[in-house]
Amino acid sequence: MLISGRRGCLLQARRHLALTCPSAAKIAPPRRPREKVEIPGLEVITYGERMHYVPGLAKPVYPPWEKDYKDPGYYKSPPAQEMALYKQKPCYVFNQRTSMLEGVRQAAWLTKTQVNSGLPPHLLTLAESLESRVEDQSERVQNAIKHARFWDTTESRPDKEKYSKTLLLNLLHLCATLQSSSSAQRRRILAENYSLAATWRRGEDLFQVRGQNGLLQCSMDALPQVCEEKDISATVDHVLETFYPVSPTIDLQKVNVYKEMNCTGFRDDYLYPHAHTLYFLESTDPQWKLKPDQFRAKMFMFAFGNALARAHKLYGTEPQSLLQRPITVQAVGSNGRIFQFLVFQLNTTDLDQDEGIKNQMWLDADVELYDFAKVRPLVKKKQVKVPAGLSGYKAEAFRKFLALYLHGAA
């Protein structure tokens, strides 16, 4: 009995030796701050004049030190109510990190837009006619994908942010080489990191789209309108979808310090004033990554913002029930494999009420360019499920990508 008891004590001691004091001890309760008692008429004796700590005397309180020069590192902004741009009526702002709860439905209500599924038919015929004349188009697209996924990295698995951007630039370069003889291609340019601002009223609320948004292809010439006048007039009968009891302003940034402005991000004498196509890439940051429907809503809102800012430059800020010439802006979103295609046409800037002519938007969502791009084969139960390399290429996705690129040039 003594031997077994001693052995149990040794085992218990060994178990306790594996623990450290912080892990074995309890967490100390948070220390309560000491209450400061102020007695009126009684002067507090501090150790400020002695220039050193004295037990029993109070700690001196000094006024904040104000420098005689501006130091950006220690700048403190005044209260919002004291700022020059402060307004009592709030403004609801949509920026590049906004994740709207209702996604495309919420964006359609905010912009007074009729949503149509699929791309306009006449856009797809542009790419089909060119595909029949280029024999090695599919091979060149697959080489562009392989370059982004396999050849442009020395790592075992390339970073998603890197290969998504490389693939987008490769496809844009390929589209330019397929139609290099067109004079309209030389009247375009790519712009990046530009800031947009567009303001409008919807009911009793004020809304604004602003911030940096993707890669923009600008053009000297405006895109032609997608549908005819009779189709635009038919939008009067369209009823906007609501999502009651959810508020339309949910997830939008509510600010009281703002300025009502409309800016395309470029100067008035810019040679390429017309927005042609916006290109978006999904963020890889888990803190700001958007779901597919919220990502499409972001494309929707910034395409609308570019069109509205341009309309205010051309026709003024007064609401127009029907624009003399509708403004068309396209958008393409990608995560390196799945593409989103969007065409937006601004028909009216009178967005206050639900009645009247609506704007139009065509959306083709979740179009896959390929199935897999594996550096190593996927093997399960000694069977190759997915071979190494590129597999499942789908030419339909690039055909739509090319159709939007050629719109206005063919």
Image (cartoon, rainbow, N blue to C red):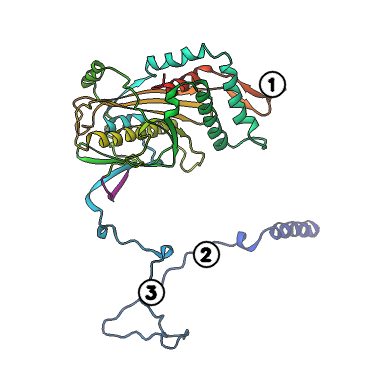
Which one is nearer the viewer's eye here, 292 or 159? 159
Asked where in the image residue 139 lies, by quadrant, the reply is: top right
Asked where in the image residue 410 lies, by quadrant, the reply is: top left
Is 25 displayed left or right of 112 in the figure? right
Looking at the rendering, the stretch of residues picked out in magenta corresponds to: 252-260
Q: Is residue 256 magenta?
A: yes
Give the label on residue 405, or none: none
Of mark 2 and mark 3, the one earlier in the sequence is 2
Q: Is residue 233 magenta?
A: no
Is 181 displayed left or right of 383 in the figure? left
Callout 3 amino acid:
Trp
Residue 195 in picture, x, y percent from top left: 38, 43
Residue 407 in picture, x, y percent from top left: 40, 21
Tell me, yes or no, whether the two marked residues, 2 and 3, touch with CB atoms within 8 Å. no
Q: Which residue is mark 1?
A: 384
Callout 1 amino acid:
Val
**Which residue shows up at 66% across the image and 29% down it?**
375
**Which residue shows up at 54% across the image and 33% down it?**
164
Q: Nearer the viewer, mark 3 or mark 1?
A: 3
Q: Residues within 10 Å of mark 1 (few under 14, many from 20)?
A: few
Tell me, yes or no, whether the two marked residues, 3 and 1, touch with CB atoms within 8 Å. no
Res. 212 visible in picture: yes
Of mark 3 and mark 1, the one earlier in the sequence is 3
- For mark 2, give the secondary structure: loop
Of mark 1 and mark 2, the one earlier in the sequence is 2
Q: Which residue is mark 2?
A: 28
Residue 315 in picture, x, y percent from top left: 23, 33
Q: Which residue is mark 3?
A: 65
Which one is nearer the viewer's eye here, 186 or 162? 186
**Which residue shows up at 47% across the image and 23% down it?**
401
State the residue lying farthest toward the right.
Answer: 3
